[in-house]
Amino acid sequence: MTKTKDAIELEYVINTTPGILFNRLSTASGLSEWFADDVKVHGNTFTFKWDVSEQKALQSMRRENKLVRYTWVEDEELEGIWFEFSINVDDLTGDVALVIVDHVDKDEIEDTIELWNRQIEILKRGLGSS
């Protein structure tokens, strides 16, 4: 039986342009730089590999330089669960913010936030934005 998952929303200011950031969030080569050890894409299906595990997700929503959503597939526990990256630009300052929405078990919220924080540090280093 699948447990319900809680949505969490995290925001990170990243010193880059929306176009460069979007490339890191929406392409196999960009995602393999910071999100997973290896990423393969076939159509809209992305295969993410970490050490010995592998998961597939469908790129289910895409708005150029604004938003990309991935919906997990082929995993009974995660079936239909999605995570999303959106890019917001502050009208006054021009600051670029990455907003992540993820769905996690209540007892894994803190660990998931720590994981995202570590991954975003890798992303920022790769962008020269740390």
Image (cartoon, rainbow, N blue to C red):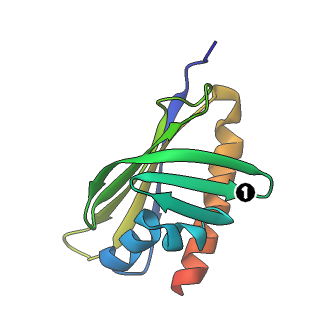
Q: Name the foreground residue: 71 vs 20.
A: 71
Q: Residue at x 75, y 49 (%)?
A: 53
Q: What residue does disc 1 label?
A: 50
**Looking at the figure, which quarter contains the C terminus?**
bottom right
- The answer to whether one can see residue 104 in this image is yes
Q: Residue at x 53, y 29 (%)?
A: 79
Above or below, comparing residue 66 to residue 56 in the picture = below
Q: Residue 84: image x %, image y %?
A: 42, 48
Above or below, comparing residue 57 to residue 94 in the picture = above
Number of marks drawn? 1
Above or below, comparing residue 92 to residue 99 in the picture = below
Q: Residue 93: image x %, image y %?
A: 26, 76
Q: Residue furthest top?
A: 1
Q: Residue furthest left?
A: 91
- The answer to whether one can see residue 130 in this image is no
Q: Residue 30: image x %, image y %?
A: 50, 73
Above or below, comparing residue 114 to residue 28 in the picture = above
Q: Residue at x 58, y 31 (%)?
A: 78
